Image: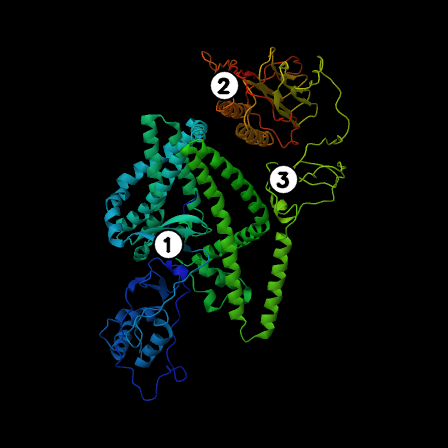
């Protein structure tokens, strides 16, 4: 779950409102429209309820620093010095004449009562800062930008916020900050470079309750993150306001009102911006301390979530902490409002215009770079969101259907923790889709309203705008029109590159490759349903090889081809400077009392220079019912012949399980889902070390054994129990790399760094649905064998 912090309307108030109006004194042709003969100099002015004057922003990037005022609804406005001076002199007792006299003394020029009356009616009252002429409170409408926080829910009022955060302000003393930062850096180095996260990840995903606990702690730490902002503001001398939660873009978000930090200097404001990240570091150090006391590895994932949250918060592209840090460093709190003026100011003929020179030169340079980075990124994100929406919706729908089925199964078994974990995953899948649809609808509605109001009274422009809208609707209809390839779930073998997003799948190529659709003609029987992408059928496809296969150059015989029920990965490399992978994964069912003589083998042979050759074979054999002969074989060999500076490795893993009878439908569904995940893993082995592959395969083996062990069809015989005969642990044993070193060695555990290679060849045996009646035989008996 992604938790955003500090809603822009609170932390970045000026960015939510267009720059304050410039004062225009009422001249002969600009007098306030008032009844003839009415003298307004005696009219008493009063501020609207809840208006607070923050004052001029220190360290501003503007040539003329704006003054800030806050309305009762929390909206922060930028005012020119003259408008702020008038508002400051309004106390509910002074009339316009008295205010004009005092303002004239403050600004050093004559301000007439007519000028004050004009600015009151044209600026201060429309902004909701003064009461109406009849004394009533103004009707104001809060700014609601696209990238703003919505559905706010206040949790604490300002008084409670101050009481809760007061003790934490002491944590910002330098004598506390320096040791905490040093401990945080040391903890991160230890976790990422020494300890690692493999064991923590394994434990978390093996136990749904632990995973839920990690999610809960992460959410609580996001709330603690907001305490950091409030405590930092209090330490600097500002007064934090309310705290609460809402929805930012499409993720739940906590927020803290630290608008009062605008009273602080640049250092105080940046400290407030970074206070949340500092509290994330405190959480990480505390979790490492708890781990040292308990040695519970799953806790370390909380440290990882803190690091990811900190990196996420530092992004300056949207209104996260990084955005506020950049805004406060430059002294330009309304960065998004500066996009239009900045882009127009880049045009040569507008360089010397006053509106292009409102910022100081260094601030203008920083803001210009920010605009040139953010605008293309946001536009590309919008285009990618629109083009990929059908595939994303189809993927989410398939995932929701699968997780909904799993949710029903888990709750049906009474496993509340596993069911709750599935519910969290369902919410995490649905929320981004709903948020994306909301953003697109709101963006379209806002654009239509602006086009309609902006072209009022201009028929030619309205016609052009209507044509553009129709063209846009046509493009969306083309991109979202229902078609077999449009609403198709994303598959594991797809690349998802920029070219894949921007270009539709080509149907002209006759060559076949994973993830692409070629111009293939297939003849299917007239009876029965036709296969579809969602319901495929098994078929044999013959793909011609480029060129001839290399001749056998090794001083030993070539391994025999695999027999039915066997699995073999054979990688033979004779090309200098190349990388070759061969991967074979298979799931085999042995039924009807047949002998289990399955062989799983991995062979990697190299005769080249500067080359990498890897073979990985993984086979699962499930023996259903009674059989008299179970003699599986697991073989691996890696050999170099005439090699210089080459890496050759082979890895073979075989798991043999016996079950008393055919598994039930739920177990078969879980096995199929796990095997699909295993096959997806087999497509992405390049770049992984064999130790990583071996570790992941062992994880899959354990998951499969757990699924089989929970099968109700496995009937336990009194006096017997599951047995497990582990093979010796593999030891690193790289193949020799001398000029003439024939022979074979066990497949090593090593970390080759291969260059880009062709996709590994995949072989496998389909998993038929076993039939039969469960017999009261022995309990599941896993008999794994592994040869490194």
Instruction: Kindly identify which residue carries mark 1.
Output: 152
Q: Nearer the viewer, residue 431 or 8?
A: 431
Residue 534 badge: 3
Number of other residues with Cα within 10 Å of mark 3, as a class: few under 14, some 14 to 19, many 20 or more:
few
Which color scheme is applied? rainbow
Cα separation between marks 2 and 3: 35 Å
Cα separation between marks 1 and 3: 41 Å
Residue 715 badge: 2
Residue 552 badge: none
Residue 784 lies, in percent from the top left, at 54, 16
Q: Residue at x 37, y 80 (%)?
A: 26
Residue 719 vertical position relative to residue 109 in the rendered view, above or below? above
**222 with respect to 653 (left or right):** left
Give the image quarter of residue 142: bottom left
Residue 775 lies, in percent from the top left, at 54, 17
Number of other residues with Cα within 10 Å of mark 1, as a class: few under 14, some 14 to 19, many 20 or more:
some
Q: Residue furthest bottom?
A: 37
Q: Residue furthest left?
A: 93
**729 with respect to 501 (left or right):** left
Cα separation between marks 2 and 1: 55 Å
Q: Nearer the viewer, residue 424 or 156?
A: 424
Q: Is residue 648 visible?
A: no
User: SS for tag 3?
Assistant: loop
**416 with respect to 620 (left or right):** left
Q: Nearer the viewer, residue 224 or 112?
A: 224
Number of other residues with Cα within 10 Å of mark 2, as a class: few under 14, some 14 to 19, many 20 or more:
some
Pointer 1 and pointer 3: residues touching (CB < 8 Å)?
Answer: no
User: SS for tag 1?
Assistant: strand
User: SS for tag 2?
Assistant: loop
Pointer 2 and pointer 1: residues touching (CB < 8 Å)?
Answer: no
What is the count of numbered marks?
3
Image quarter where the C terminus lies is top right
């Amino acid at each position: 779950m992604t938790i955003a912090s500090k809603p822009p309307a609170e932390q970045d108030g000026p960015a939510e409102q267009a720059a304050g109006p410039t004062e225009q004194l009422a001249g002969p042709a600009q007098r306030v429209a008032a009844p003839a003969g009415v003298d307004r100099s005696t009219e008493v002015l009063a501020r609207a309820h809840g208006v607070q004057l923050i004052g001029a922003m220190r360290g501003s990037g503007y040539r003329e620093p704006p003054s800030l005022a806050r309305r009762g609804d929390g909206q922060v406005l930028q005012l020119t010095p003259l408008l702020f001076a008038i508002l400051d002199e309004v106390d509910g007792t002074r009339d316009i004449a008295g205010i004009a006299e005092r303002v004239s003394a403050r600004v050093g020029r004559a301000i007439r009562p007519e000028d004050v009356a004009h600015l009151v009616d044209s600026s201060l009252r429309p902004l909701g800062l003064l009461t109406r002429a009849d004394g009533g409170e103004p009707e104001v409408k809060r700014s609601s930008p696209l990238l703003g926080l919505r559905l706010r829910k206040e949790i604490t009022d300002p008084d409670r916020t101050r009481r809760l955060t007061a003790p934490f302000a002491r944590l910002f003393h330098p004598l506390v900050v320096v040791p905490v930062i040093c401990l945080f850096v040391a903890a991160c180095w230890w976790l990422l470079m020494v300890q690692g996260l493999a064991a923590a990840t394994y434990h978390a995903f093996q136990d749904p309750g632990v995973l839920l606990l990690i999610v809960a702690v992460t959410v609580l730490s996001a709330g603690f993150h907001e305490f950091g902002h409030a405590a930092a503001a209090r330490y600097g001398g500002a007064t934090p306001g309310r705290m609460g939660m809402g929805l930012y873009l499409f993720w739940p978000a906590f927020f803290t009102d630290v608008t009062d930090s605008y009273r602080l200097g640049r250092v105080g404001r940046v400290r407030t911006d970074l206070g949340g990240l500092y509290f994330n570091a405190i959480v990480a150090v505390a979790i490492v301390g708890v781990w040292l006391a308990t040695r519970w590895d799953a806790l370390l994932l909380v440290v990882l979530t803190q690091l990811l949250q900190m990196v996420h918060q530092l992004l300056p592209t949207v209104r996260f902490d990084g955005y506020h840090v950049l805004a406060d460093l430059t002294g330009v709190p309304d960065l998004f409002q500066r996009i239009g003026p900045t882009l127009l100011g880049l045009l040569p003929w507008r360089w010397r215009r006053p509106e292009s020179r409102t910022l100081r030169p260094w601030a203008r340079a920083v803001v210009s770079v920010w605009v040139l980075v953010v605008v293309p990124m946001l536009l590309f994100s919008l285009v990618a969101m629109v083009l990929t929406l059908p595939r994303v919706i189809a993927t989410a729908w398939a995932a929701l259907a699968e997780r909904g089925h799993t949710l029903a199964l888990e709750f049906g078994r009474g496993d509340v923790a596993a069911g709750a974990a599935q519910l969290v995953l369902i919410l995490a899948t649905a929320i981004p889709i709903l948020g994306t649809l909301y953003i697109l609808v709101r963006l379209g509605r806002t654009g239509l309203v602006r086009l309609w109001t902006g072209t009022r009274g201009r028929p030619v422009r309205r016609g052009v705008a209507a044509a553009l809208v129709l063209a846009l609707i046509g493009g969306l209809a083309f991109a979202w029109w229902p078609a077999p390839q449009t609403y198709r779930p994303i598959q594991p073998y797809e690349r998802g590159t920029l070219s894949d997003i921007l270009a539709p799948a080509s149907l002209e190529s006759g060559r076949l490759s994973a993830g692409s659709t070629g111009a293939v003609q297939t003849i299917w029987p007239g009876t029965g349903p036709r296969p579809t992408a969602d319901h495929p059928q098994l078929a044999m496809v013959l793909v011609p090889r480029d060129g001839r296969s290399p001749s056998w150059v090794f001083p030993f015989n070539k391994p025999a081809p695999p027999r039915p029920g066997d699995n073999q990965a054979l990688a033979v490399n004779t090309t200098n400077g190349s990388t070759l992978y061969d991967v074979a994964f298979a799931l085999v069912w042995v039924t009807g009392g047949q002998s289990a003589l399955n062989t799983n083998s991995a062979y990697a042979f190299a005769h080249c220079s500067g080359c990498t050759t890897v073979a990985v074979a993984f086979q699962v054999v499930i023996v259903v019912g009674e059989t008299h002969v179970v003699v599986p074989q697991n073989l691996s060999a890696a050999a170099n012949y005439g090699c210089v500076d080459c890496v050759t490795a082979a890895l073979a893993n075989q798991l043999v399980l016996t079950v008393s009878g055919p598994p039930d439908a739920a177990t078969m569904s879980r096995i199929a889902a796990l095997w699909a995940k295993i096959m997806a893993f087999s497509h992405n082995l390049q770049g992984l070390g064999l130790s990583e592959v071996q570790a992941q395969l062992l994880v899959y083996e354990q998951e499969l054994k757990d699924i089989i062990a929970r099968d109700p069809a496995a009937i336990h015989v009194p006096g017997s129990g599951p047995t497990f005969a582990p093979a010796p642990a593999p030891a690193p044993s790289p193949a020799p790399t001398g000029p003439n070193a024939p022979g074979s060695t066990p497949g090593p555990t090593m970390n080759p760094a291969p260059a880009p290679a062709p996709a590994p060849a995949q072989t496998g045996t389909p998993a038929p649905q076993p039939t039969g009646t469960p017999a009261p035989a022995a309990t599941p008996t896993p008999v794994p064998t592994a040869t490194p």
